[in-house]
Image (cartoon, coloured by chain):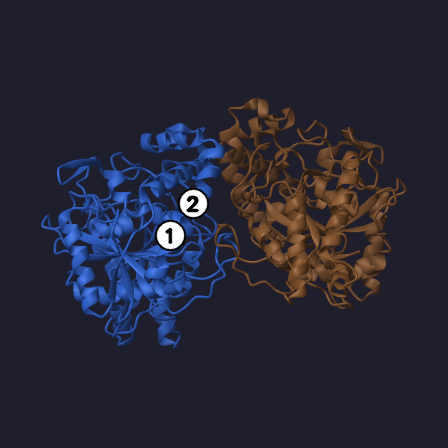
Chain colours: A brown, B blue
Amino acid sequence: MTILEAAAAIRAKKVSSAELTAESLSGIARLQPRLNAFITVTEERAQERARRTDEELKRGIDRGPLHGIPIAVKDVYCMRGVRTTCGSKLFENHVPDRDAAVVERLEAAGAVITGKANMHELAYGITSSNPHFGFVRNARNPEHIPGGSSGGSGSAVAAGMVFMAMGSDTGGSIRIPASFCGTVGIKPTFGRVSRYGVMPLDFSLDHMGPLTRTVRDAAICLGAIAGHDPRDETSSRQPVPGFLPPGQVSIQGLRIGIPENFYFERVDPEVEAAVRRMASAAANLGATLVPVRVPDIRELNVIARVILLAEASAAMEKYLSRRENFGADVLSLLDQGRLIPATDYVNAQRLRRVKQQEFRRIWRQADCLLTPCTPTPAPKIGQTTITIAGESEDARLASTRLVRAINLLGLPALAVPCGVHTSGLPMGMQLIGRPFTEPLLFRVGAALEDVTGFDKRVPPEC
Amino acid sequence: MTILEAAAAIRAKKVSSAELTAESLSGIARLQPRLNAFITVTEERAQERARRTDEELKRGIDRGPLHGIPIAVKDVYCMRGVRTTCGSKLFENHVPDRDAAVVERLEAAGAVITGKANMHELAYGITSSNPHFGFVRNARNPEHIPGGSSGGSGSAVAAGMVFMAMGSDTGGSIRIPASFCGTVGIKPTFGRVSRYGVMPLDFSLDHMGPLTRTVRDAAICLGAIAGHDPRDETSSRQPVPGFLPPGQVSIQGLRIGIPENFYFERVDPEVEAAVRRMASAAANLGATLVPVRVPDIRELNVIARVILLAEASAAMEKYLSRRENFGADVLSLLDQGRLIPATDYVNAQRLRRVKQQEFRRIWRQADCLLTPCTPTPAPKIGQTTITIAGESEDARLASTRLVRAINLLGLPALAVPCGVHTSGLPMGMQLIGRPFTEPLLFRVGAALEDVTGFDKRVPPEC
């Protein structure tokens, strides 16, 4: 069931929030040993809230489509009185005294949070290390990684444990698990969703967004959490539009940019074919495909790396004296970041502005870009290199290669499943738009999702 | 004569641009040995342009109030084919192949540039060192400094060599010379004026603006140079309003904030009295004086220093191998900046955002702030400490103390002379507004200027 279907079922009295919540909690309990998608389950709190939302509906209080829907949040989101670990030994006993803005807004919309999703250490660790709260496994195939850093969120949604799980995306951390787990994921425009109450990793790169089973579900969730928050000094005052595409969505006349350079290079041939099939489908629906040349994304990725390293170390510096609390991979990245001189960081930020300007030219030609999301499906757990057309590449660098630059540009990007690889694993595409055009991305995503034929059902083994 | 008066005289055929330009050039030549306000005089270019503007007017082409008016630009502004030194030995023979956006716009408005104003080395040196192009002296009293870094601009306008001189302001470099020389100076909102073609010092702190004899002249000049420029990636798309206040300006009902903390502490008693007299004058004109508490400006000044040092070193790093090309003071600052870790810079920028947010609360209470501009009048050349009420302070730190934080906040700030000290030197006040409220600052500035009684005439010895 999607959020929209569940919302209809609740209102038709076919099911209650208490029942959906009980199902979510039992699903989490059943799959936790197999997938390890959660760090904390908020069972009592969820049951209490589910009862309350059921009562509200009886009294005619309807908070909209998320009313009574069980969801999860990545363990970077603070919840008052609930342990919030950020996937780190450092915070294993940390209990915040406040809710993140996203938590506040989701609960105000009636959502029921059944747990805190597992994640890479500090949203920063790499998959090949052994994190404090253990590996998450991919619900589509437990021998494979779910991608990171919002891996628990991706696996939990793919396995049907929750209808939605909030992720966070600093260099691809929503879109990579969406692509690897076969879910939808949106990294909104920088400033669109408040970061108040989220453990910061990278000041100028962190973005908050949902992972869901369908594009329309993602649109509903973004609608609940978008908007200005004076407590987040990077929050935008841009008005919040309607996000949900209509039942019959038209993309007639839209100009969809297909990159001629970079995005289809060193990509698994099946992934390329799947994304190009989606482009043809868009053309069949009346969209115009526009070949575009994009600025040098390799250079953007280098700039992103300097900024990422420096900002993460700035955020974590005060904890670094207790080195035993960090995984070796995270510690190595944090130490690298401390050695970056301010002058290099300043020059990276200057270049970033120039590149943002260069990228703007694309929007004269196209309304959005369609690209692969990850160059391959999910690697196996422990796999450190991937091979495409005979060439080897570091698995982590490969997974971030097509998504990381978009954080630097602050643009909205929507990941949507676009097919199944012969390995049986899902493949993902990425739609990139100009700032604050999430409604357009949802329209294109929904139109293509309706024709992709991707089986969104929970894998039978879950 | 003000720009408005000169513009009227030109149109009444009482004077031609060629005559005004000849006067400007002879004034520069006469006063150069005494004040050293210029690095380069663009005599032939200016004469040619003056002839052309006179011909245009004869043919009925009228480019507005700056048509035919002789002005100067600080030697940070690139002019095609004209040496642009930035006050540095490094660029003593540098001849750019392009015009700065500000130069383009001023010339498109008909202005005639008669020279490039002297300045602190790289807009960064301190007054106590001996710059490559020599000291500028204050036109009000040549034994005193004109303030920096736009000292040549301040002295040239005060001495009547030009009607306006463009300055640049990274930590007070327009407002300090305005205050010390008895001129008006506006540091516009960040992004209001294009920085294209200006030698960069600090990516996130540099602002471009004019120094003039009157507030209305400053408004005319800002009108000519404000607006979006795609070549400057920090340029704002905010629409450009009318800046020029009407002849009869009303400030009835405006709420003028008078800081209760920081801004009147450690200020020369005569300066304090002069600014408070201006506050009373504003109240007499119908404005409401609102006592306000401002956030900790000392902390803002510390943040500004970290950002200033790091960004300046980033901009100049590539030249640092030729150390003999720098003054000892500048070299020391550049070396300091190279040692700042990126993590410190990142934390300073984060804190900056928080402080910007804090500062916004002020605008609920007040429409603008009225403060002293510098705590004292201009120190003597060679004077390294100033004394206020028996307490000594570094002269350079004192001069930037009340202005530097505003660059960090990106707010517009207008410096206006507000009286004459018993030493015979001018004293200045500062009006600070919320982003893009320059028109309001000009209104308040013009209303007070009309009642201040400050003698704007050129000193008799010039």
Residue at the image position 52 percent from the left and 27 percent from the top: A320
Q: In which quadrant of the rendered image does the C terminus of chain B lie?
A: bottom left
Residue B95 seen in this snapshot: no
The amino acid type, in three-letter code, at marker 2 is Arg
Query: What kind of residue is marked 1?
Result: Phe
Q: Which mark is residue B359?
A: 1
Q: Tag on residue B352? A: 2
Q: What is the quadrant of the N terminus of chain B in the image?
A: bottom left
Left or right: residue A324 compared with residue B462: right
Cα separation between marks 1 and 2: 10 Å
**Local SS, label 2:** helix
The answer to which quarter of the image holds residue A179 is top right
Q: Nearer the viewer, residue B438 or B300?
A: B300
* Residue at 20 percent of width and 50 percent of height: B31
Callout 2 crowding tier (Cα within 10 Å): few <14, some 14–19, many ≥20: many
Q: Disc 1 vs disc 2: which is toward the camera?
A: 1
Q: Secondary structure at mark 1?
A: helix
Give the crowd class for mark 1: few <14, some 14-19, many >=20 residues within 10 Å: some
Q: Chain of mark 1?
A: B
Please give the name of the residue rendered at 23% of the width and 46% of the height, measured from the top-left corner.
B146
Q: Classify A377 as above or below B18.
A: above
Q: Position of residue B35 (x, y in %)?
A: 21, 46
